[in-house]
Image (tube, helix red, strand yellow):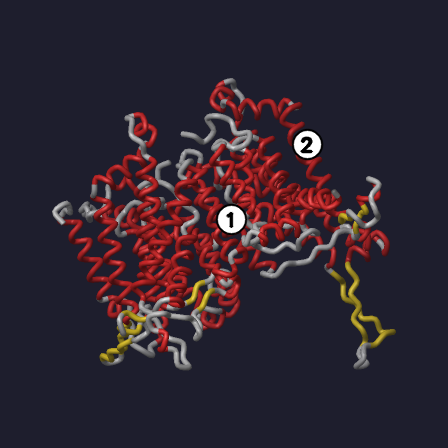
Amino acid sequence: MDQFLLQVLNGLDKGSAYALIALGLTLIFGTLGVVNFAHGALFMVGAFCAVSMQKIFEISKVTIDATKTDFLGNPLKVKTPYVIEWFGESAGNAMINWSVPLALLLAIPVMLLVGYIMERGLIKHFYKRPHADQILVTFGLAIVIQEIVKASYGANPIPTPAPSQFVGSFDFGVLLGMDPNAVIYPYWRLIYFAFSAVIISAVFAFLRFTTFGMVVRAGMADRETVGLLGINIDRRFTLMFGAAAAVAGLAGVMYTPINSPNYHMGMDFLVLSFVVVVVGGMGSLPGAVLAGFMLGILESFASMNAVKDFFEMLYLPSIDQIVIYLVAIIVLLTRPRGLMGKAGVMEE
Amino acid sequence: MNTFSKADKNTLLFVIIITMLAPFILNPFPEGSAMAQFNAGYPDLMQRFAIFGILAVGFNILFGLTGYLSFGHAAFLGVGSYSAVWMFKLLSMNIIPALILSVIIAGVFALVIGFISLRRSGIYFSILTLAFAQMSFSLAYSVLTPITNGETGLQITLNDPRILDGGTGAGNLPVTGLFGMEMRNTFTLDVGAWAFQFNVGYYVCAIFLILAFYLSMRIFRSPFGLMLRAIKTNQTRLNYTGLNSRPYTLAAFVISGMYAGLAGGLMASMDPLAGAERMQWTASGEIVLMTILGGAGTLLGPVLGAGFIKYFENIFSKINDNVLHTWFSFMPDGLENAIVWVLHFFVGKGWHLTLGMLFMLVVIFLPGGLMEGADRIRARFGRNKGDGDDTPNATTPAE
């Protein structure tokens, strides 16, 4: 039981990332009809917003402290980050400590802007082109973004720690009356899950309960008619593209303490998120979220030792790396439309 | 060959002449001159031209002719490489059994993947093939380590069984060959300042390229090819005529997978090792780029595209900051440094950035690739003479 619970929890954080990226992908596909192969790159750009925030906070003023000397007898150079100088010792240190959550504030405008430029500057010109061209151009864009990030931040993962208050683990088992240390779970992953739940609910609430969201949903159903009613649907769709980019970016920012960001993290997530979208059903937002969490949890179950031993008993290799793909194959063979796919989406 | 028009025969003849005389054509600059670094006439690079040419020709049958954009073609390349290396380990260092096995295994693999992913078309198909390629990558990288040797890659060793020629490995690793002709043998012809290199491995690859090209030409001009083109043009209408298009698409997928398997087998024959990175999505993307850069749906385009990409990859990777500084040394220092600083991101290790840019520029401005560009230039200068390829509007991939 405790093992079971632990694996469910372990699956939640990956599942949250899958769900958030898949949500953005579905949103873009549903509104603009474009499959965005650069969406993983947007996730990665978000993660590097966190890295940049950390670097910005660590920009230091170098002063020479005459009272201290290093082992050669030279005056010691002391680095003081500007934030400490400006905001004082405690506030400055708190800012450096909280750089990842604060990076959300940087990521929102950056991602909205990136999304806006991408849609207006590039993708707009591809609505009338075949789907293959859209895939190819966004794929090329993904390579370009990835290489730019690689050129500016290097190829190695950059550690971006969570605020020190959230380092450590939460003893989940005690809450449910189990032995201490039976089910322990890092705080930050709980926060990541809560964060993604908030974002997902916010997106759904926005689409469901606001006039803007209603118009967007109407546009998703029948773009032409909404346009004929005198509503500038293109502008709203552009904003939705920006929002989808922001969702991916925020998911990336918050993911950095879990795995240190590197330049190819986006593509690794993108392929799996595509599988999530296919399993959930193209064009279905709840399907994308559901399949994201489901596959994340499934992946963590497949990496359990008990499961690995079971496969070893059958002389099979362990399948934790590929279980998502296997599920996708089974779903496609039995329900080609995906779990919650709508009829007529991408069926020609 | 009576189905071929005169222009087709000329195209084939052109390919034969180019591939056979490649050691001369690709080596225009004398040895030791400043321009010698732009020569491409050395065995390793020429082999890559031919191998990736085969790959692109095969991919073109699926993408250019049938209109299905596969993002997982590198998987078949990897499968072909692994099977060939296993054949070198188990049977003999002769490349013929290795190539036969790699084509067959890649074909079977393509049959399985095609059977599943061809249930959907358009975007779904691209996503599925991408997922399958990524799955094959994980399989090769970690899950199936006993077969693929994981991260290290599969290599031949001295104590492999090699049933047919087990006794050869006396201290040295055996080399791949074709009935005694070693693939690495190179004959150098010195003419004045030029050194032309004739490599056995290259000529083997070149002959396979010509055969592959001839076969793809036959497919393009056959009723089967016409059917594939109909699928690309309008699959729905084809289905309404009561025709089941699945067997045709599956056949195209398998043929194209077998081409990739042959390319992978040849790659392993030239250098007997196989690694998982050959199957990564970037490799698949590169295949797509070669085809569209040359011109998807045209006969000659993919071969040109493959050569173009591999040549510039080689040249660009060689250029570093020092080379750039010597090139622009005639300029004032500030300007020189500025130009070098900008170009620095695009050369050397930054080749992938150039590749990505090129990818976008081609898709945006020249969706028909180099062949369309050539057509446009020809039209501009009023010499509107067909060169035996497809109609110009066949170059845009349909969904």
Q: How far from the left and from the top, in percent, is residue A273?
A: 56, 42
Residue A157 appears in which quarter of the rendering?
Answer: bottom right
Q: How far from the left and from the top, in percent, is residue B271?
A: 38, 68
Residue type beneath disc 1: Ala
According to the picture, the residue beneath numbered tag 2 turns out to be A202
Is B228 positioned to the left or the right of B125 in the image?
left
Asked whether B29 or B205 is in front, the reply is: B205
Number of the label disc, if any, that sits on residue A62: none
According to the picture, the residue beneath numbered tag 1 turns out to be A142
**Numbered disc 1: secondary structure:** helix
Asked whether B134 or B93 is in front, the reply is: B93
Dot 2, crowdedness within 10 Å: few (<14), some or many (≥20)? Answer: few
Residue ranking furthest to the top? A229
Q: How far from the left and from the top, in percent, is residue B190?
A: 24, 80
Residue type beneath disc 2: Ala
> Which chain is disc 1 placed on?
A
Reply above or below: B289 against B265. Answer: above
Q: Is residue A105 visible?
A: no
Is B107 positioned to the left or the right of B342 in the image?
left
* Residue at 32 percent of width and 34 percent of height: B245
Residue B14 appears in which quarter of the rendering?
Answer: bottom left
